[in-house]
Amino acid sequence: MRSGAVQYAGISGATRTLGYCDYFGEGEVMLTDGRHRATATAMTDVEMLEIERGDVQYLLRRRPQLLHRIQQRAQ
């Protein structure tokens, strides 16, 4: 996110507030053809960047260490 605050509720029921430079939707959705099962609710006006799955997969092929960081963050 570029600005704002988002309340993110995962499928486990855990919630967290996301802000500048945080991201979501990465795990199963970006890496497979899975569906996103969490809920993200804007708490303020939010400015975000959307990165298409194909672009993420391209990045991960070129920078394998990025996949490791995303997997760690998803846990």
Image (cartoon, rainbow, N blue to C red):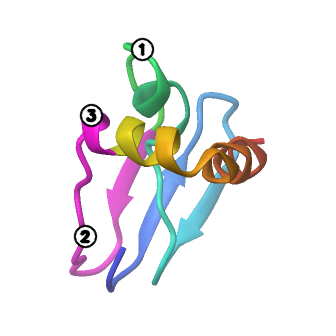
| Residue positioned 51% across, 53% down in the render | 8
Bounds of the magenta segment: 39-55
| Amino acid type of the residue tagged 3 in the rendering | Gly
In the image, residue 72 sits, relative to residue 18, either above or below, namely above
Q: What secondary structure is found at the residue carrying circle 1?
A: loop
Q: Point out the image quarter for the C terminus.
A: top right
Image coordinates of residue 62 in percent, x first then y, are 49, 47
- Does residue 6 show up? yes
Q: Is residue 46 magenta?
A: yes
| Residue 6 sits inside the magenta stretch | no
The image quadrant of residue 44 is bottom left
Please name the residue that numbered disc 1 is placed on.
34
Work out whether mark 3 precedes mark 2 in sequence or the reverse, and give the earlier one: 2
Label 3: few (<14), some (14–19) or many (≥20) C-alpha neighbours in 10 Å: few
Task: Give the residue number, with chain letter if any, for mark 2.
Answer: 48
List the residue tagged with mark 3.
Answer: 54
Question: With respect to residue 24, does 56 lie above or below?
Answer: above
- Mark 3 and mark 1 lie on one chain; the one further toward the N terminus is 1
Residue 13 location (% of width, % of height): 66, 36
Task: Decide if residue 23 is on the left or right side of residue 14.
Answer: left
Q: Amino acid at mark 2?
A: Met
Q: Is 47 drawn above or below residue 33 in the view shown? A: below
Visible in this render: residue 37? no
Q: Residue at x 48, y 34 (%)?
A: 38
Mark 3 to mark 2: distance in Å? 18 Å
